Amino acid sequence: MANYLRRIRILLVTWTASGNCLDPVALRAPMAARPPERPMGVLARDLLLAAALSVALYVVFGVVNARLLVGFTTPEVLLLEAGAIVLVAYLIARAVTNATNAMLRHRGLSPRGHAVRLFLNLLVATAAAFALIRLAGVSVESILLGAGFTGIVLGLASQTVLSNVFAGILIVFADPFRPGDRIGLVSAQYSLLGSTYPHETIAPTYTGTVEDVGLTYTVVALDHGPSARIPNGIVIQAMVLLTGGSSLHRVRLTLPTTTPLADVEGSLPAIAREFPAPFPGAAPPRLEVADLAATTWDAVVVLWSDVRDANAVRDRVLRVLLPRIGRPGAAPAPGSPRP
């Protein structure tokens, strides 16, 4: 008995030292020289090794146990079977962990995988615990039936938490954005906002830079304010706007009818100098007449820019227009922009 336990311990120590499911190539190659591995290939390889060991253990304990385990008492056989279950569960957990690590390394997201690995390992540990309970002669069905009411109560109480956890895992695997990306989150529960001052209709967007994606929260450093911890259940339902790079801006302003159209159009070259073309072939700034009333008319300056803050773009456009179209001593029209 002691000899068998010593061999199992040596096997586990060798497995832990390898860190790669007893892969001979990984044991011989240095860490920096390992070629990139495909996640599905890693998962298939490790699960194949776990399945082969499971079959071998089943043959030992279920088919030829009468000849190989001569001299072992019933408690000792049960102890060996329990050790075999723990070993197989450990191999499966290692397989899932290695596949997750390979996938995250392939995407450059290794820091985000700790929560996913923890959750998947908990699932494997739960399955192993049920197998050990069944091996002890306790009916798993009776335990599940007895804990059914408690499970329903806990499930209803932790519905929001569980939804955030599953949403966080889905975000990690779907990879809609990564830490460092600039995004805008538009919640599906809200519609567009109407104009309260002269501007185009906008969406209620929370814009910022992604700092981290955890198991329950996504941390975004907002452009105007502190970092926000947004529940993953809301993030997974929101419309995600990738705001990095150049974008098309529409700056709307209301002017009195006494302001000639030619004066505003004459300011477009100065706006073009203020906002150089962000990419080859970008259209120069242009002017659109959006509305006309008895005493006012609405103009929209349309331009491409790599400036990310829409408010900063509006401020710079208005600063260019104000000296050219302002009239000293003239009363501003209702709704006209102010610096």
Image (tube, rainbow, N blue to C red):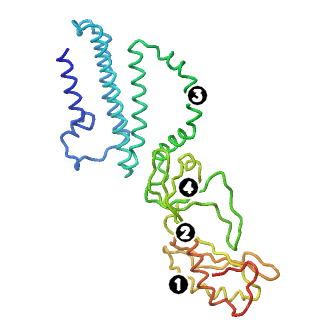
Instruction: Pick the residue in front: 277 or 216.
Output: 216
Q: Name the residue under label 2.
A: 247
Does residue 73 appear to the left or right of 228 in the view shown? left
**Marks 1 and 4: which is nearer the front?**
4
Secondary structure at badge 3 equals: helix
Name the disc covering residue 273, or none.
Answer: 1
- Separation (CA) of disc 4 from disc 3: 33 Å
**Marks 2 and 3: which is nearer the front?**
3
Q: Name the residue under label 4.
A: 240
Residue 149 location, quadrant: top right
Does residue 283 appear to the left or right of 110 in the view shown? right
Secondary structure at badge 4 equals: strand
Q: For the residue marked with disc 3, what is the amino acid?
A: Ile
Q: Name the residue under label 3.
A: 152
Instruction: Pick the residue in front: 40 or 6.
Output: 6
- Separation (CA) of disc 1 from disc 4: 32 Å
Label 1 packing within 10 angstroms: few (<14), some (14-19), many (20+) = few
- Separation (CA) of disc 4 from disc 2: 15 Å
- Separation (CA) of disc 1 from disc 2: 17 Å
Q: For the residue marked with disc 2, what is the amino acid?
A: Ser
Which numbered disc, 1 or 2, marks the residue that appears first in the sequence? 2
